Amino acid sequence: MAKAIPFETLIIFFLVSTAFAQYQTGQQSQQQQIQQQEARQCRIQRITPSQPTQRIQSEGGVTEMWNEFEDQFQCAGVAALRNIIQPNCLSLPNFSPSPRLVYIQQGEGLIGMSIPGCAETYHSGQQSVRGGGVSTRQGEQRDQHQKVHRVRQGDIVALPAGVAHWCYNDGNEELVAVSVNDLNNNANQLEQKLRVCVHN
């Protein structure tokens, strides 16, 4: 026959279980309070205007970056930068491990994006079907994985994570593009810090 569990053991087990449950509830409520406090600190009403803290001058223009460790940027999980490209100049191809939104504040130009996918990016000619036959136009080369778009003031361009891109100012005035990188995105696997890789 099975031995009966002493009454004192049951009471001790019950008291320990109750104390552990209260401890966990206290921990959870403490975490909730911290999260609520952080949420109150990250209110949209507390956004203040700020100026770029870093400026990089080049032949074709200027890149200005805001301090990503500023509270409002940390709260939103973003990093901001502004590219000012002179007329008839090109920004070097670059990419970021995080997704980016680009707002064209002023000017017009071309933006090119190299979308990853098929490894075959070069074709010696273009084939077309005419009257059941195939003809090839020699000398015409086209990279089917690079998308080039015309942009002008007021446009917003979404750049996926890791997509190499460039911008050319073919207008008569400066092209000003303000970018916001989403550092909290799952695609940004390195760390919550702005990383821009430039191709020379």
Image (cartoon, helix red, strand yellow):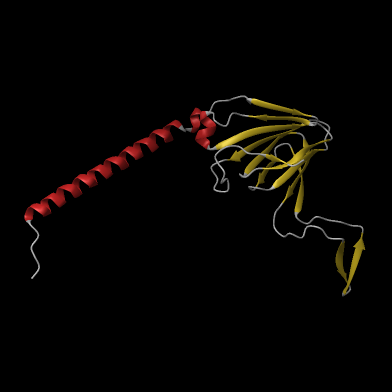
Q: Position of residue 26 (x, y in %)?
A: 27, 40
Which one is in front, 86 or 119?
A: 119
Side of 24 relative to 127 (left or right)? left
Which one is in front, 5 or 172?
A: 5
Q: Position of residue 56 (x, y in %)?
A: 71, 28
Q: Position of residue 197 (x, y in %)?
A: 68, 40
Rendered residue at 71%/33% (across/down): 83
Q: Quadrant of the C terminus?
A: top right
Rendered residue at 62%/45% (across/down): 97
Rendered residue at 73%/48% (across/down): 113
Q: Quadrant of the N terminus?
A: bottom left
Q: Position of residue 141 (x, y in %)?
A: 86, 56
Rendered residue at 65%/48% (across/down): 162
Q: Quadrant of residue 176?
A: top right
Compared to 80, does 122 lie above or below? Answer: below
Compared to 56, does 6 lie above or below? Answer: below
